[in-house]
Image (tube, rainbow, N blue to C red):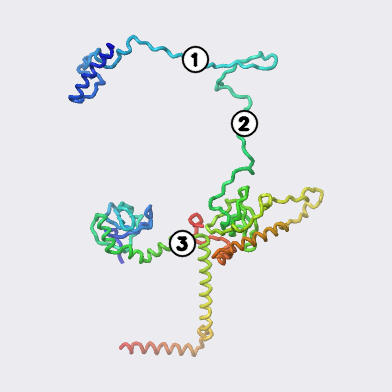
Amino acid sequence: MGFSRFVEPGRVAYIADGPHRGKLTTIVDIIDQNRVLTDGPESGVPRMGIRLDQVHLTKFRMKFSHGTPTRLVRSFWNKHEITKKWEASSWYRRVENAKKRRAMTDFDRFKLRHHKSHRNQVRKLAFKQLYNIKKKEGAWRRKSKEELAKAKADRAAKKGKKPAAKK
Amino acid sequence: MVETKVKKAPAASKGAKAAKGAKPRIRTNPLLAPGVHRYSASHIFRKSGAWKFVGKTTEKKVTPRKPLTVEKKIGGEKNGGTRVVLLKKRTSSYPTSNSIRKHPSKNCFSQHKRYTRKTLTPGTVLILLAGRHKGKRVVLMKVLKSGLLLVNGPFKLNACPLRRIHQNFVIATSTKIDISSVNIPEKINDKYFQRVKDAKKGKKDDGEIFAKKAERYTPSEERKKDQAEIDKQLIAAIKKNPEKKLLFIYLRTLFGLRNQQYPHRMKF
């Protein structure tokens, strides 16, 4: 598979560094190998040059030409519903989760740990119950030679049947 | 009067000129040819105003000189009675002894003004970082006069008694408990926590230098009583919190860092 996200006009990018960190913007023009002109009128990012290493490319792309003015970038943005699509993406969810995690206080962290361990306890108990039921049925018992031979014969019979059914 | 007339005449002509072509005022005397200047010496003399000072003298200002020396009286016989001393000491003169400087008055350490962090308000849950109880989460009761923090486990929950700790050895969390209902008696101050000196230690003729028994600290009955009383009130205060159940477990558990947790990046 080749690359699918390119630095091109109309490519929506996530700003990962700098004063506008955490916002979306679009590439409008390419200044040089390292910098691009970006604009994000709907996400509160001014039209500015930005280093490419401060920016992560998203899968979203609008089709417009080099140097499209802010007015048109805005209309394209709304037409393509970029904000809506972004907020539905898993990337956005990940960002939001990280934000929440960062804002957690010591007590919050404790509560999370407490509830998690409680959940795991319940889960473990449920698993144990199912396991024991199966155990009683003899699912984990070592099979005798006769039983193994029977199982093998069954499997062979199934295999022989299947191609016939297909024909 | 003659002088003023002379002064006015060129000004008038200049004004007329300015109206015509607004030429800048001539300040230099350009050289037209070697030895020939644009303006004559008399012209320059008139223009520059040098004529104003012809035949005038300014009086010299006489500033009184400050004396360099002073005559000081000297006591004792055979000392001549007086001595002439330089007011400004020579750079080469070294004192034979250090002069006694007057120190600015400082009050005692116990009287110093104390500063406590803004986050350290009574009722804050703290994480202890040093001492016997490090890692425990405790409740800040109040700030004592010495600047030390009075903390309490409560003892019933995590075995951290009423004790003092410096604010540097503590992380303040944003969890707060309303302890306005807790009454801390006046007697619980810095003196209350002072170490009791052992009276027996002074005796040297015991002969039991090597057979010393390691004495364990045992709290006095008074302390036990105070501890129980404050614990009771504090636990009652925690119970008023809507998250009381979790708070109890929270105060019981020790603080610890896990992978990818950096305390300087975390919010407490």
The label on residue B64 is 1
The label on residue A101 is 3
Q: Label 1's element?
A: loop
Q: Chain of mark 3?
A: A
Q: Where residue B126 appears, x then y in whole percent? A: 57, 57
Which residue is labeled 2 in the image? B102
Cα distance in 3D space between marks 3 and 1: 79 Å
Q: Label 3's element?
A: helix
Cα distance in 3D space between marks 2 and 1: 35 Å
Say whether residue A33 is left or right of residue B157: left
Q: Chain of mark 1?
A: B
Judge by depth and name the residue closer to the eye, A90 or A166.
Answer: A90
Q: Chain of mark 2?
A: B
Q: Looking at the image, which residue sits at the far left?
A: B20
Q: Where residue A65 appears, x then y in whole percent? A: 23, 58
Which three-letter amino acid code belongs to the residue tagged 2?
Lys
| Sequence-earlier tag: 2 or 1 | 1
Question: Residue shown at 56%/63% (left/top)?
Answer: B241
